[in-house]
């Protein structure tokens, strides 16, 4: 241009100063916002916008209910409705918030949080490193849903519809909030000025003195229309390179023969084929209008009369499809008469945001994942610009006839239309904790105390190689890092490295003592009540002293009768003996004193042999018995310690169960003494089925009561086994499973098929098929898990940076290598670092590069 200007002089300069081409923002319809009514005033319509909470799934009942709602929408060509689902990688605000929440302890915890956050920032855009190859892409996305309505009717009419719609959405379980002007500006900007480098939403300012459309785009926005895509370019504040995006639009090739609303989440990513997913950021749009029912009825009646003549004439043999169409028209007639549905015109559009390097792969991925879900897409080549503009909020009224001429409009019953509403995505858990994205790449976090379940207890099961120990350690870390307290009953030193790294307390069989009376006096002082006034009366089940009495009674009952049942009389007498012993000896109470009290009660009750026999059964747990030290020396569990691991490998099988039960009692007491019930407290029991083996009524009752008690004190028990069938090997383990509202199912072993066959109603067959697809963590580079939290089921992957992998690894060679370094007086943190470099040097080098890039971009040192 400079050459032309130089050649043509001032005339050429003047010509270029008044170009014929307009800026695109002048073509946008947005003008004003009515604060009072919450309506947007556009060039040819009035509209309103809603942000919707994405649904994690759908049912046939929801489809029917949505159809009923849609049938109440205003009809005609003066109305356009649009449901939209977006997905992008702008998740940095969630990552940074979680990092802040779990960094409060400082030190090594802050370093781990920083490493994990940096790794998550990188993988959100570039995908997690796995061992499956480049065709698999697992990143972090955030999905959001919206609803837009535009109309040529008066403001009052639109506002009345808005009010009725709000009620209808809530009835269908769809929470919503009004979209404000700055949010609409951001939404439109995200479409036309999309920036793949952007990692967090940019808050847009709304100036009510300026027209809305002038605030939507960057002033230097440039749009080049190609046959296959629209190329968008613009400069970005605080970004060296301009945003350069290829926007590609797709429409339905044809209506599928069958498609259900719950299939729509499979368009985001396939759970059965991990390589099939939407790789790029996207926007799915479903525009529709409800056709005039009166006109549709008249037209349908005319078709029926004409078809009836042909079907009942000799010419029917020349029209083989006439009979089928006649039957469909009759069915439609019945539907109109019974008001089961109406006729709608729908335009379904998929938009992806790519670039030159990844366009082919992104297009192939989009076509593949939608095709597997049951929707065949076709690029809207030659009309990419029209398609893009028509799907902007409040803009379809202008482009509807053009879209019809382009063959993009589909007539459809409303009962089928609702199956195309893009409001089904993935469960969102953005409450902080352990980073655990879903298998459809929705960023999410797992924290057992924030799952909205009736209790916080967990049943965790996974075979060897599933990443179960790694998974559980990460849960423990997330609880501890956020200020919570963890107690771990370990078997095999799996948690030793983590505990020592966090400066926690690590105890072995030689220094584990479990007198159940150690902390009673402290509990009395905290509660302001006397333990002597406790009762097993069900009316006092909320009383902390009565809860503690029930725990101790259950423990000693399980010690006295490990394989036989105690009746109610014996248990009541045992509670009396415990209270008698406490009144006499207070903090010095021993199992011996409970035994003495039982003998006294027996003598006072006409030498009741039942009680004396019960007392004799406590012999080996008294101070002179073989287990005297374990159950009579003061408990070493300190309520003020935030991370305690107890290694149980040193205990013999004969004493293991009462030791575990005594630990549950002591841990429940320390949970209570920890004070604020809002502080999360968790006890993890590894190899739970073997530690709880036994079979009698009081043992089952003990587990039931112990697990319920934790909930009342703000605590949680997590039982961990090698396989789901292990939870059913003993009544106690099954009680632990049944009292856990949260189930985590990782890769299962060969016993899983047998378990499913014997318990066909335990899991949905579809869930079973997905669990059977879980692979070993060492083959994939990540762990797979199904989480059942109350009535909500979701599927997840756990990824880790190489440094964290070395820290939590229980793989024999890696664990032994780190142990040897530590034995040679190399600090544990340094030993973990050396272990990581020794076993996965390439991944560590890549991670170092990621951290260096983060430091350069954010001008920090990590």
Image: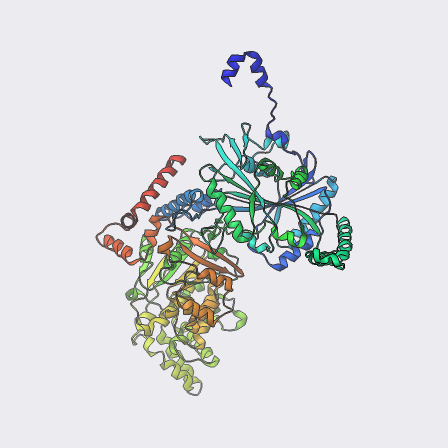
Residue ranking furthest to the bottom: 606
Residue 531 in sight in this render = no
The C terminus sits in image quarter: top left
What's the colour scheme?
rainbow
Residue 209 in the image, given as x and y percentages of width and height: 64, 29
Give whichever of 410, 36 is nearer the camera.
410
Up-down relation of residue 218 to residue 678 (above or below): above
Residue ranking furthest to the top: 9
Up-down relation of residue 180 to residue 595 (above or below): above
Residue 496 in the image, given as x and y percentages of width and height: 31, 58
Residue 292 in the image, given as x and y percentages of width and height: 75, 47
In this rendering, would 102 be left or right of 229? left
Quadrant in the rendering for residue 649: bottom left
Give whichever of 304, 613 is nearer the camera.
304
Number of numbered discs overlaid on the protein picture:
0
Residue 120 in the image, given as x and y percentages of width and height: 42, 45
Quadrant in the rendering for residue 634: bottom left
In this rendering, would 220 be left or right of 591? right
In this rendering, would 299 be left or right of 24? right
Give whichever of 657, 460 is nearer the camera.
460
């Amino acid at each position: 241009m400079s050459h032309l200007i130089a050649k043509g002089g001032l005339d050429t300069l003047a010509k270029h100063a008044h170009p014929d081409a307009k800026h695109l923002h002048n073509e946008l319809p947005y003008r004003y916002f009515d604060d009072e009514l919450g309506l947007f005033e556009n060039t040819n319509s009035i509209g309103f916008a809603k942000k919707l909470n994405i649904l994690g799934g759908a049912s046939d009942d929801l489809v029917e209910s949505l159809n009923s709602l849609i049938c109440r929408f205003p009809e005609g060509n003066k109305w356009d409705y649009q449901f939209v689902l977006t997905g992008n990688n702008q998740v940095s605000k969630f990552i940074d918030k979680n990092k802040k929440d779990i960094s409060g302890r400082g030190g090594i915890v802050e370093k781990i949080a920083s490493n994990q956050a940096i790794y998550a920032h990188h993988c959100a855009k570039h995908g997690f490193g796995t061992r499956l190859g480049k065709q698999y892409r697992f990143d972090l996305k955030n999905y959001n849903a919206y609803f837009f309505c535009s109309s040529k009717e008066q403001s009052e009419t639109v506002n009345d519809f808005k009010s009725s719609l709000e009620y209808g959405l809530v009835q269908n379980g769809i929470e919503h909030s009004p979209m404000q002007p700055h949010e609409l500006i951001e939404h439109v900007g995200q479409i036309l000025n999309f920036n793949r480098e952007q990692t967090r939403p940019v808050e847009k300012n709304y100036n009510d003195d300026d027209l809305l459309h002038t605030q939507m785009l960057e002033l230097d926005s440039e749009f080049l229309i190609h046959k296959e895509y629209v190329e968008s370019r613009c400069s970005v504040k605080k970004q060296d390179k301009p945003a350069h995006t290829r926007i590609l639009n797709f429409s339905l090739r044809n209506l599928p023969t069958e498609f259900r609303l719950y299939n729509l989440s499979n368009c985001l990513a396939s759970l059965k084929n991990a390589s099939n997913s939407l790789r790029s950021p996207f926007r799915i749009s479903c525009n529709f209008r409800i056709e005039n029912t009166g006109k549709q009825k008249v037209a349908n009646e005319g078709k029926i009369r004409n078809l009836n003549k042909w079907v009942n004439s000799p010419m029917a043999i020349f029209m083989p499809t006439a009979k089928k169409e006649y039957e469909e028209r009759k069915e439609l007639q019945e539907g109109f008469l019974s008001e089961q549905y109406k006729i709608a015109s729908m335009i379904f559009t998929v938009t992806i945001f790519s670039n030159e390097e990844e366009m082919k792969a992104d297009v192939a991925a989009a076509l593949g994942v939608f095709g597997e879900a049951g929707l065949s897409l076709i690029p809207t080549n030659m009309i990419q610009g029209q398609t893009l503009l028509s799907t902007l909020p409040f803009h379809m009224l202008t482009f509807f006839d053009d879209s019809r001429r382009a063959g993009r409009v589909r007539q459809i019953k409303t009962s089928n239309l609702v199956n195309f509403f893009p409001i089904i995505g993935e469960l969102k858990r953005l409450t902080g904790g352990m980073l655990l994205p879903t298998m459809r790449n929705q960023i999410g976090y797992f924290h057992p105390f924030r799952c909205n379940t009736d209790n916080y207890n967990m049943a965790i099961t996974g075979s060897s190689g599933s990443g179960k120990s790694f998974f559980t350690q990460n849960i423990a870390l997330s609880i501890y890092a956020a200020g919570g307290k963890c107690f771990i009953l370990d078997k095999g030193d799996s948690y030793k490295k983590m505990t020592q790294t966090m400066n926690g307390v690590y105890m072995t069989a030689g220094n584990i003592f479990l007198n159940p009376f150690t902390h009673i006096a402290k509990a009395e002082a905290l509660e302001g009540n006397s333990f002597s006034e406790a009762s097993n009366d069900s009316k006092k089940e909320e009383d902390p002293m009565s809860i503690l009495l029930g725990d101790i009674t259950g423990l000693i009952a399980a010690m006295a009768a490990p394989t036989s049942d105690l009746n109610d009389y014996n248990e009541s007498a045992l509670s009396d003996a415990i209270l008698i012993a406490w009144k006499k000896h207070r903090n010095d109470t021993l199992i011996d004193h409970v035994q003495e009290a039982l003998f006294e009660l027996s003598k006072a009750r006409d030498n009741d042999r039942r009680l004396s026999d019960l007392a004799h059964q406590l012999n080996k747990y008294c101070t002179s018995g073989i287990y005297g030290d374990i159950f009579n020396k003061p408990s070493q569990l300190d309520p003020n310690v935030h991370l305690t691991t107890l290694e149980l490998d040193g205990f013999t099988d004969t004493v293991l169960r009462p030791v575990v039960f005594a630990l549950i009692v002591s841990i429940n007491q320390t949970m209570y003494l920890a004070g604020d019930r809002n502080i999360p407290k968790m006890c993890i029991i590894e190899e739970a089925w073997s530690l709880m083996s036994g079979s009698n009524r009081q043992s089952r009752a003990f587990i039931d009561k112990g697990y319920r008690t934790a909930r009342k004190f703000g605590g949680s028990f997590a039982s961990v086994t090698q396989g789901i069938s292990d939870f059913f090997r003993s009544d106690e383990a099954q009680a632990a499973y049944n009292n856990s509202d949260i189930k985590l199912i990782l890769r299962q072993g060969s016993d899983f098929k047998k378990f499913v066959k014997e318990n066909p109603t335990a899991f949905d067959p579809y869930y079973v098929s997905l669990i059977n697809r879980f692979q070993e963590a060492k083959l994939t580079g990540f762990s797979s898990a199904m989480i059942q939290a109350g009535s909500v089921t979701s599927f997840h992957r756990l990824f880790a940076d190489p440094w964290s992998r070395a820290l939590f690894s229980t793989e024999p060679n890696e664990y032994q290598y780190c142990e040897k370094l530590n034995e040679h007086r190399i600090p544990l943190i340094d030993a973990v670092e050396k272990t990581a470099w020794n076993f996965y040097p390439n991944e560590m080098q890549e991670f170092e590069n990621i951290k260096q890039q983060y430091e350069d971009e954010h001008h920090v040192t990590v």
